[in-house]
Amino acid sequence: LALNIGGRRATVAEFLDALIAVVPEARSLISAEVNELPFPSIVDDSGLQELLGGSTHLTLEDGIARSVAIFRDALERGAIAAPQAAAR
């Protein structure tokens, strides 16, 4: 069974803006090219919606905030380790 996961479309620039809004200290830690990736920006997730009986999509900021909370919790529990900064 193969299903697509849909959701809000965001450009790289929009993602970076949302990430920095949620995690201000990320501004000095991240940079990115703003070129679009060679993947479809919108996919048909009707099969998944039918299987699950519908779902609610989070805002980009809420999704980032939830992901950050999950990773911070995993760091605090020692389940994962923070990467070491690369030498420049």
Image (tube, rainbow, N blue to C red):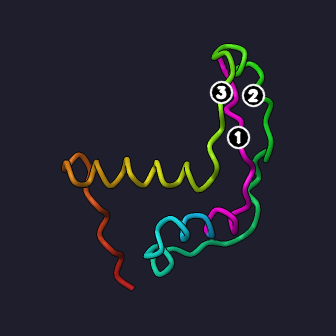
The quadrant holding residue 31 is: bottom right
Q: Earlier in the sequence, mark 3 or mark 1?
A: 1
Residue 11 location (% of width, % of height): 73, 61
> Which residue is more in the foreground, 84 or 64?
64
Measuring 28% from the left and 48% from the top, which residue is drawn there? 74
Q: Quadrant of residue 87?
A: bottom left
Give the magenta range: 1-16
Residue 79: image location, x then y, percent: 23, 46
Q: Which residue is mark 1?
A: 7
Pointer 1 local density, CA inside 10 Å: few below 14, some 14–19, many at least 20: some
Give the image quarter of residue 61.
bottom right
Work out whether mark 2 precedes mark 1 in sequence or the reverse, and give the earlier one: 1
In the picture of the structure, the residue carrying the numbered disc 2 is: 45
Callout 1 amino acid: Gly
Check disc 3 and report the residue beneath it: 55
Q: Residue furthest bottom?
A: 88
Q: Name the residue located 46 percent from the left edge and 49 percent from the top edge.
A: 67
